[in-house]
Each structure stands twice: as structure tokens, then as C-alpha cells.
């Protein structure tokens, strides 16, 4: 019966905690979104309620699930919000930053519980103290004459206490889920007027003691309270634990103006059935802090399950490709029905693949939504005026890519703010508006996602870049095209910033950008016009699980070259083949490219060993170019990426493997590794 | 909740050892430090089983803090001893 710490439960509670973590993250995101949208304005009544509701929900959930540390900051924050909401203290713009800081502290605690990330307790204590100081320092708001305070009557109505009767019949699993009823009851009791709270448990089943499951809940709770809290606040107490049908609420206003004996007004209408209690009214316009209406027809699914599904679709694609390959040799007249069936299977498999891949797609707004705050803070630090815009927030891309694109985008945004956009004075001097514009836009172009980071700042300075590149020992020349010069900024160690700031300018940013983007099969292009601004364009594949590849033959083996690294292919003429420092190179339009011989690198028996007998595939990755010698080009195809390390062992020069239609395994080439191997040969 | 199964087995043993129609059966809570809703429910169901056997369960020596917890969880009526005859 006692619950000593350290004793392990027979039930895996992680599954249930995860629901709280996700809800908490959503609440934090919603809260931040509202705060950022405010600028320095005072939140209106609805926005204030939404922020309050988010903080309150986090606190309630944390208490119920036993994360007491997370209730500390939320509790003080809630108190401050409550006093602001009731106009007991005046709003000051600095409070926006304070609430953002508080949100960060809660997010840090969440990350600790969720992922075991370290917590800076000092920062948390500091935020808590700041919130408390804001409460203590708040002078009472001046009293308005009744005729000026239009909201007074409405608030007076809200504050009238009412008798509320609540019956909670939890689901049988509530104990097994680790829900602490004491937290729920005590939170509900806090909403009651002093001495006006009753709680009574009632057994709804009386099974034989020998047959019962002791962890199964067979209790119903009846509550009676006199409260000034809204129905929504009462229902919020049960946010993480109750479905609509598990709660019955009846309340009546205790109207002080109604003489005793006169009938009271009609009781409020009960919430509509069929929804989770806490989702009440979530579809109301502007109802921040609630999930969107679409959740009514959606379910949460663990990402691992989706990955398993994607993996199985990959297997199915391979099987289908194998069957098609076998059928190639069959007589089409004798096996017409079989051929028809296989064609149908191929269509169905492709459709299924499209649907399953779309499950992993999430809107890029998940990443974009991080930037308004970043821009606000950095612009303030740099003394710049910036209008931040996002376009195409609903563009969807693979969840795996979303996680990997956030950092590169962050670097580009920071660079645009630090180096691209000018100070208001400089902008005015050059005939521009003092406020600069920074825009993030996303769209789907063909089979790729294109993300643009555009600013209307000074643009890239060609001369400065070349001078800096020479200084850093990066090979370059005045004859280079603009596009080639812009690419120099991606070289490791390159930075034109005269001062190293904490925003950018350490020279470690842009090469990381290109590496991260390329690691997910992406490319970065730059367009810039002096005095008019710059545009960085990131182009990404739609997914990481399936890639467009060029299959090539080397002896008996087949390899897949990712299509995004292929420039062109050619059959070299003898005069194009040269030797530089003992290494074979091919001269293409004045440029000497090293020849990478796959048969040597992978130790294979090959029919073609000399470049003039085979085909050279020109490739480019990480700013390095080369020519891969192959026997033949076979096909362009979509291949399902499989981890070779999981199934066999790591093979240098390969980024994974795929299973071809004939059932054979083909390595997917990793170009940067191949270049490195070539240098060692 | 963590010890619900253990407590269940313990109470089953006690119930099995209880003779039929014995009049009063005392349940001593003096060594119970704390209780949660799951524990309260189990105890209430145990009392019901004792009653079905024809005995009158009487809870004794409840520490003050435990009483408060039982009250807060709403189990005061279910875990109350019947009034003295």
C-alpha cells in the first residue's frame, strides 16, 4: 500500500508518460506561438486565457504523473497570469520575455524527464524568482469608474460562486496508468471555496476478493463543491485522465441577486457528448492551447510503428520487383493472367507506398515556428529592425528530414540577421526602409522540397569573399563565376565577419550547413545581388527511406549512385585521359577530375579496367568532383534504403544497400567516403 | 499501486484464515505509513469480503496522517468502522 521510492512497477508507465510529454510539448509550443505573436502588446482576454490554460494544463499533468519539479515554475507562472487576468497587477511588456523564459525552463525539465538531458537548476530557480518578483512588484490596477469598466459586470458574473456536483467514473486502467488520484482531488479541491469541498468514493463492483485484479479500478468518485472556477477550469483538472463519458457535471449558479425561494436560472447546458472532456470547445476560433479540430479524426501513433510500416512496404516493393523480374522471361500469351495480376500488383504497391510514405510527412511549420522567437531575440540584440515572414508553412516533408533541417536553417537565419540585413541607419542611408525583411518559404517542386531563406539586406560581397578565401588558403580566382564564388562560403573555416559574435561569425556555420544538408541528400544554392539581398535555396528529397538512384554495373556487381550527385556521364576519348601526380584523371571542359575505379576500391573482378573501355559517371558531393568508372549504366530507379550495418557490417564507401528486383544486394555509394578512399589508394 | 498485488495476496491469506461467523475482526493499520487510492479500494473490498463472511470488520489504530489521506481520497465512509453497538 505504501509507495516506497525506487520500487519498480510491474506496469510500463512510459507509454502513459509519453502522452503527457507530447501534450506538454504542444502546450509549450502553443504558449510560445501566442507570446511571440504579441510582440510587445498586452494579450487580450482570450489570449491570456489560452496562455493560462497551457500553463495550468502542464502543471496539472505534471502533478498527476508525478513530475513534481515541473509544477514549481508553472505554479508561479500560473499565479502571475491569474493576477494579470484578473487585472490585479498591470501588464508590462517585459513579462512577455519572462513568460518565454519560463517556457524554456519548463521545456528543459520536460527534456530531462523525456530524454534525460541535463537540467540547469540555477536557471530554473532564477526564472521562478523573477516570476515571483513580478507578482510581488505588481501594484494593484487603478480602479475604473463603473461606467468605464465595461468588463466589470461580466467579470462579476464569472466570479459568482456556484454549486457544482461532479461524478468521475474512471476507466479501469487508471491505477495501472500510474495516475495519482490524490493530485486530481487536491487540484479540484483548490478550485473550491474554503470548506466547500466534499469527496466521496463509491465501489461500483464488489467482486470476490480471490478473483479480483487489485490494479483494476472499481471506484467512482462523487464530488460536491462551491466554486468560482469556470466549467472549463473544473474539466481541465481531468485533462489527462478522463474521457467525456467518464465525467458527469451538474452545476447551478448561486445567484446572490435572486431572492431566496425564487427559482434559479436554467442550469447551464452540459458539454456535448463524445469528446474528451478537456477538448471541450477546442475547435472554437482562436482557442489556443487546444488541439485543432482535426484531432477528432486522428490518432497518435508511435513513430517506430510507422517506421516498421515503411520498412515492410520496402520489403513488399522488393518482392514485387522480384516477381516482375521473374515474369519477364515468361510467355506473355501463356501467362497473360499472371502478367495482368503482376501489373495490378505493381500499381497497388506503388499506391500503397505513396500512402505509407505520406504518413511520415509532417508540415514544415514545425521547424518554421521556432524562428519567430529566434529572430525577435537576435534582432533585438543586434539593434536591427526585422520583419519576419514565412510562406508555405503547410508544405510537408519527411519527419526524419524535419529533425535534420532545423539546424542548417537556424544557421542560415542567424547569418542573414547578422551579416545580411543592415542596421536601420545603414538601410536608410542606402534608400531602403529601416525595417529589413527576412522570409522563410517552402514549396514542393517535382520530387523535392525547396526551402528558401531570403533577405533584402546587403547581399554577398564578391570581392570580400575572394579576398577572405585567399587569406584562408582556399583555392579561388577572380575568373570564377558568381555562383562559384558564393559556394566558397561553405568551405570549412571560412568567415568574412570581422568580429566573432555569439550569433555567427565563428566560421563554423556555413560548412556545417552544407554538410548537414548534403547528409540528407540535399543541395544548397545561393543567389545574391549587391545591395538588394540574398537567397539561400535548400533543395531536399521528399524522404530518406527511398531514394532515386542510378544503377550501374561493375563486373558481376551492381551499385547504386544517388541521382542527386550525378552531373553527367560520358565515354572518354583517349585525349581526355591524363595522369597527374601518378593518378588517372579525365579532362572535362578544362577541369581535371580524378577517376574512381570501383573494381579497385571494392576489389572486384571487372570486365572494364581502363576508362576508355567503359563509362565515366561525373559526380559531385561536398564540393568535390570526380568521375566513377563503370562497365555500364543500367537503369534509373527508386531504391529502398536498407542499413547494411544492421544486417551485415559497415562497408566503407557505402551509405547503405538495397535489394534489387533479381533479389541481389546492391551497395548505395557514399561519395564523400569514396573520395576519401581514393585519396588513400 | 506498486504493492497492490503483494497486499492483495496478504489480504487473501488473512481472509482465508478468518473463521466464519466470528463477530468482530480487527484490522490494525498502525504500521501503514501511507496509502493511495488503489490501496484504499483494496482495503474497502477486503472489508466487504469480511462482512460477507459474517464478521464485522473494525479498523483500529489508524495513524492521524493516514486518516487524513483516507479522508482526502474520499474513502472515509467506506473504511469507517461500524458504530459501536
Image (cartoon, grey):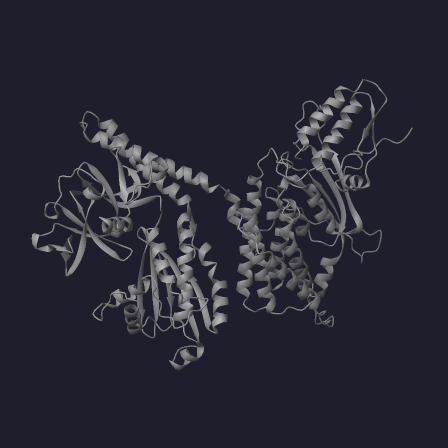
Q: A371 above or below B39?
A: below
Q: Quadrant of the N terminus of chain A?
A: top right
Taking the image as shown, residue A151 lies to the left or right of residue A341, namely right
Q: Is residue A588 visible?
A: yes
Taking the image as shown, residue A286 lies to the left or right of residue A259, namely left
Q: Residue at x 69, y 32 (%)?
A: A218
The percent position of residue A312, horizontal first and vertical second, equals 38, 35
The percent position of residue A565, horizontal first and vertical second, equals 26, 52
Q: A374 above or below A263?
A: below
Q: Residue at x 69, y 25 (%)?
A: B9
The percent position of residue A627, horizontal first and vertical second, equals 19, 51
In terms of image quadrants, where is residue A336?
top left
In terms of image quadrants, where is residue B77?
top right
A388, A288: nearer the viewer: A388
Residue situated furthest right in the rendering? B85
Q: Is residue A283 visible?
A: no
Amino acid at each position: 500500500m505504501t509507495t516506497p521510492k525506487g520500487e519498480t512497477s510491474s506496469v510500463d508507465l512510459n507509454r502513459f508518460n509519453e502522452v503527457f510529454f507530447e501534450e506538454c510539448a504542444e502546450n509549450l509550443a502553443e504558449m510560445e506561438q501566442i507570446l511571440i505573436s504579441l510582440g510587445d502588446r498586452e494579450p487580450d482576454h482570450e489570449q491570456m486565457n489560452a496562455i493560462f490554460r497551457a500553463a495550468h494544463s502542464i502543471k496539472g499533468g505534471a502533478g498527476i504523473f508525478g513530475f513534481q519539479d515541473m509544477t514549481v515554475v508553472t505554479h508561479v507562472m500560473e499565479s502571475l497570469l491569474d493576477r494579470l487576468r484578473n487585472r490585479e497587477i498591470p501588464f508590462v511588456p517585459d513579462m512577455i520575455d519572462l513568460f518565454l523564459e519560463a517556457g524554456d525552463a519548463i521545456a528543459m525539465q520536460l527534456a530531462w524527464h523525456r530524454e534525460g538531458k541535463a537540467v540547469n537548476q540555477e536557471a530554473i530557480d532564477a526564472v521562478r524568482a523573477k516570476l515571483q518578483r513580478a507578482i510581488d512588484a505588481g501594484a494593484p490596477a487603478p480602479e475604473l469608474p463603473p461606467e468605464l469598466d465595461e468588463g466589470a459586470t461580466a467579470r462579476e458574473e464569472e466570479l459568482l460562486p456556484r454549486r457544482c456536483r461532479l461524478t468521475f467514473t474512471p476507466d479501469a486502467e487508471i491505477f495501472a496508468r500510474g495516475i495519482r488520484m490524490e493530485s486530481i482531488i487536491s487540484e479540484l479541491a483548490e478550485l473550491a471555496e474554503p470548506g466547500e469541498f466534499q469527496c466521496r468514493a463509491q465501489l461500483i463492483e464488489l467482486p470476490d476478493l480471490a478473483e479480483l485484479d487489485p490494479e483494476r479500478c472499481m471506484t467512482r468518485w462523487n464530488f460536491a463543491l462551491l466554486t468560482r472556477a469556470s466549467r472549463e477550469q473544473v474539466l481541465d483538472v481531468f485533462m489527462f485522465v478522463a474521457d467525456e463519458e467518464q465525467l458527469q457535471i451538474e452545476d447551478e449558479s448561486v445567484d446572490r441577486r435572486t431572492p431566496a425561494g425564487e427559482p434559479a436560472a436554467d442550469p447551464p447546458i452540459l458539454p456535448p457528448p463524445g469528446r474528451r472532456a478537456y477538448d471541450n470547445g477546442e475547435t472554437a476560433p482562436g482557442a489556443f492551447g487546444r488541439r485543432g479540430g482535426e484531432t477528432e479524426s486522428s490518432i497518435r501513433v508511435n513513430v517506430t510503428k510507422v517506421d516498421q510500416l515503411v520498412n515492410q512496404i520496402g520489403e513488399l516493393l522488393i518482392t514485387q520487383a522480384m516477381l516482375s523480374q521473374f515474369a519477364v522471361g515468361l510467355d506473355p500469351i501463356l501467362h497473360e493472367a499472371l502478367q495482368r495480376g503482376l501489373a495490378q500488383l505493381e500499381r497497388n504497391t506503388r499506391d500503397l507506398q505513396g500512402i505509407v510514405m505520406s504518413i511520415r510527412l509532417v508540415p514544415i511549420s514545425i521547424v518554421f515556428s521556432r524562428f519567430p522567437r529566434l529572430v525577435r531575440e537576435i534582432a533585438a540584440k543586434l539593434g536591427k529592425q526585422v520583419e519576419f515572414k514565412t510562406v508555405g508553412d503547410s508544405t510537408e516533408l519527411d519527419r526524419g528530414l524535419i529533425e535534420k533541417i532545423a539546424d542548417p536553417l537556424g544557421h542560415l537565419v542567424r547569418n542573414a540577421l547578422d551579416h545580411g540585413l543592415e542596421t536601420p541607419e545603414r538601410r536608410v542611408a542606402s534608400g531602403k526602409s529601416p525595417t529589413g525583411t527576412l522570409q522563410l518559404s517552402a514549396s514542393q517542386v517535382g520530387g523535392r522540397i525547396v526551402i528558401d531563406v531570403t533577405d533584402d539586406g546587403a547581399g554577398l560581397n564578391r570581392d570580400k569573399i575572394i579576398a577572405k578565401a585567399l587569406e584562408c588558403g582556399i583555392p579561388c580566382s577572380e575568373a570564377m563565376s558568381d555562383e562559384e564564388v558564393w559556394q566558397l562560403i561553405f568551405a570549412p573555416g571560412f568567415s568574412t565577419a570581422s568580429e566573432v559574435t555569439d550569433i555567427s561569425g565563428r566560421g563554423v556555420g556555413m560548412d556545417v550547413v552544407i554538410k548537414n544538408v548534403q547528409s540528407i541528400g540535399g543541395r544548397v544554392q545561393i543567389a545574391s545581388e549587391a545591395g538588394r539581398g540574398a537567397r539561400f535555396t535548400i533543395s531536399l528529397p521528399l524522404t530518406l527511406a527511398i531514394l532515386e538512384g542510378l544503377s550501374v554495373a561493375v563486373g558481376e556487381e551492381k551499385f547504386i549512385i544517388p541521382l542527386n550527385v550525378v552531373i553527367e556521364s560520358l565515354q572518354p576519348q583517349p585525349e581526355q585521359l591524363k595522369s597527374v601526380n601518378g593518378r588517372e584523371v579525365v579532362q572535362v571542359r578544362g577541369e581535371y577530375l580524378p577517376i574512381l575505379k570501383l573494381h579497385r576500391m571494392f576489389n572486384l573482378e571487372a570486365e572494364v579496367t581502363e576508362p576508355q573501355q567503359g563509362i565515366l559517371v561525373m559526380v559531385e558531393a561536398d564540393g568535390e568532383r570526380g568521375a566513377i568508372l563503370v562497365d555500364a549504366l543500367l537503369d534509373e530507379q527508386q531504391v529502398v534504403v536498407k542499413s547494411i550495418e544492421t544486417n551485415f557490417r559497415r562497408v566503407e564507401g557505402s551509405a547503405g544497400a538495397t535489394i534489387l528486383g533479381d533479389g541481389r544486394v546492391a551497395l548505395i555509394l557514399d561519395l564523400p567516403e569514396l573520395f576519401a578512399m581514393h585519396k588513400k589508394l | 499501486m506498486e504493492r497492490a498485488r503483494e497486499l492483495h495476496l496478504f489480504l487473501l491469506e488473512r481472509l482465508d484464515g478468518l473463521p466464519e461467523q466470528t463477530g468482530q475482526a480487527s484490522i490494525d493499520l498502525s504500521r501503514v505509513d501511507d496509502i493511495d487510492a488503489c490501496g484504499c479500494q483494496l482495503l474497502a473490498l477486503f472489508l466487504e469480503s469480511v462482512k460477507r463472511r459474517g464478521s464485522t470488520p473494525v479498523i483500529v489504530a489508524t495513524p492521524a496522517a493516514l486518516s487524513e489521506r483516507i479522508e482526502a481520497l474520499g474513502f472515509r465512509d467506506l473504511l469507517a468502522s461500524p458504530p459501536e453497538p
